[in-house]
Image (tube, rainbow, N blue to C red):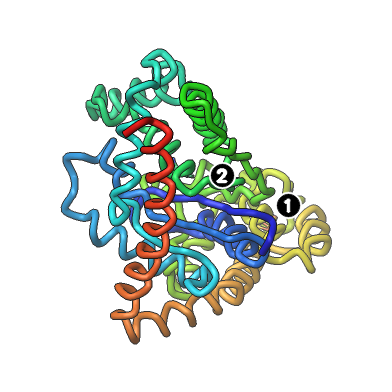
């Protein structure tokens, strides 16, 4: 510890996939050097899925199990659920008083998403959806986080958060909120098995909870170099999804894999079989942690209760300072 405070969150979208595992492993690494706060953003999930709340509780639980299986450690990090710390909502409300509408409308993801989700038949011309980045700013600033590990897609939200912090400090003549830095880490980007972006909704993902046989089946379905018809045809590993995965899960043999592919010396079937075993070996510790957890599922409630208490203590302190700065 000693490098400051980290905060990050994810919306509970259901079971995570191995693309998320790359992100989570980064969070796990940060646990050693930072004071970490990781939370499940269930209110943010409602900004788009306000009509489908039946699965929200289950999705939060899946996410929690996936996080802990990936190695997030409740003894090292504060792991909690956004809606269990109501102070986020109060800060969001107070921020909303001085945040210009134009700032929210200008956030690049806003108009894009409004249009895209509209095409998918979802009406998100709501107050909550417009305010998404402001709620996120409250999430971050209430812990006075120094850094936020996020993907590139979240950079506009981080910039927005910094503007909100500056405006608060300026309006109320205070230094209460530090401006958080984005922590862009090199997280390998795993494509889906069809080569598109990995997403549960495309059904091209490998779930984190996949059994060894399920992993073999998903790898068997991966698209390879379409120019290879016979196994002796020279291959082009650069266009092959299996090769991208070999780079991450089988780096020791990457030269050999490339050479044999280019030379037409290995068929795609054994190449995939080799990869599946590597992924399975990689997932083994994740599976063990999951099994251990699920043998004693009551522990999940304790972890969340304890994490939320710890988070709330910090959030309360900040809110006292905020109210005082604002003359409330
Ligand atoms: N918007 C983030 C995402 O979709 C989730 C999120 C909500 C978040 N609040 C946050 C991330 C605060 C970092 C910090 O991934
Ligand atoms: Fe892809 Fe392997 Fe087939 Fe080459 S041999 S095209 S790397 S699956």
Q: Ligand 2 lies in which image quarter?
A: bottom right
Task: Tell me which residue sits at (24%, 29%) in the image.
Answer: 122
Q: Position of residue 167 (x, y in %)?
A: 50, 23
Task: Tell me which residue sits at (28%, 52%) in the image.
Answer: 83
Look at discs 2 and 1 and give the one toward the viewer.
2
Residue 281, relative to residue 110: is it above or below?
below
Which of the marked residues, 2 or 1, is nearer the chain's N terminus?
A: 2
Residue 153 seen anywhere in this rendered image of the structure: no
Return the residue nearer the eye: 38 or 212: 38
Q: Is residue 63 left or right of residue 108?
A: left
Task: Tell me which residue sits at (56%, 74%) in the image.
Answer: 280
Q: CA distance from mark 2 to mark 1?
A: 41 Å
The extreme top residue here reads 102
Which quarter of the rendering shows the C terminus? top left
Return the residue nearer the eye: 13 or 93: 93
Task: Tell me which residue sits at (25%, 25%) in the image.
Answer: 127
Mark 2 C-beta to ligand 1 under 8 Å: yes
Return the residue nearer the eye: 149 or 152: 149
Residue 254, relative to residue 42: is it above or below?
below
Q: Is residue 257 left or right of residue 4?
A: right
Which quarter of the rendering shows the N terminus? bottom right
Return the residue nearer the eye: 75 or 270: 75
Assign a secondary structure to mark 1. loop
Assign a secondary structure to mark 2. loop
- Residue under label 2: 150
Task: Judge the density around disc 1: few (<14), some (14-19), many (≥20) Cα neighbours within 10 Å.
Answer: some
- Residue under label 1: 233
Q: Position of residue 78 (x, y in %)?
A: 47, 64
Which quadrant of the figure has residue 304?
bottom left
Q: Position of residue 219 (x, y in %)?
A: 53, 62
Residue 241 seen anywhere in this rendered image of the structure: yes
């Amino acid at each position: 510890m000693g490098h400051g405070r980290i905060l990050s969150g994810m919306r509970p979208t259901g079971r995570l996939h191995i693309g998320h595992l790359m992100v989570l492993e980064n969070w796990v690494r940060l646990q050693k050097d930072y004071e970490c706060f990781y939370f499940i953003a269930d209110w943010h999930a409602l900004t788009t899925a306000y009509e489908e709340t039946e699965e929200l509780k289950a999705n939060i639980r899946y996410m929690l199990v996936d996080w802990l299986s990936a190695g997030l450690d409740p003894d090292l990090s504060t792991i909690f659920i956004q809606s269990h710390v109501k102070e986020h909502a109060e800060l969001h409300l107070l921020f909303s008083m001085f945040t210009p509408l134009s700032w929210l409308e200008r956030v690049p993801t806003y108009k894009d998403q409004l249009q895209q989700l509209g095409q998918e038949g979802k009406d998100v011309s709501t107050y909550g959806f417009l305010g998404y980045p402001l709620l996120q700013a409250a999430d971050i600033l209430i812990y006075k986080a120094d850094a936020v590990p996020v993907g590139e897609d979240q950079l506009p939200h981080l910039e927005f958060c910094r503007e909100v912090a500056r405006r608060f400090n300026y309006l109320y003549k205070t230094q209460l909120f530090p401006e958080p830095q984005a922590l862009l880490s090199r997280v390998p980007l795993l494509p889906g098995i069809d080569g598109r972006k990995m997403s549960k909704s495309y059904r091209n993902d490998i779930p984190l909870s996949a059994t060894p046989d399920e992993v073999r089946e998903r790898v068997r379905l991966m698209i390879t170099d379409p120019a290879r018809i016979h196994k002796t045809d020279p291959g082009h590993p650069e266009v092959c999804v299996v090769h991208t995965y070999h780079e991450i899960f089988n780096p020791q043999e990457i030269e050999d894999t490339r050479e044999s592919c280019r030379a037409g010396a290995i068929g795609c079937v054994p190449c995939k079989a080799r990869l599946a075993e590597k992924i399975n070996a990689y997932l083994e510790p994740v599976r063990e942690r999951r099994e251990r957890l699920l043998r004693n599922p009551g522990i999940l409630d304790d972890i969340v209760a304890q994490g939320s208490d710890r988070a709330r203590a910090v959030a309360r302190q900040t809110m006292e300072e905020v109210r005082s700065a604002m003359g409330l």
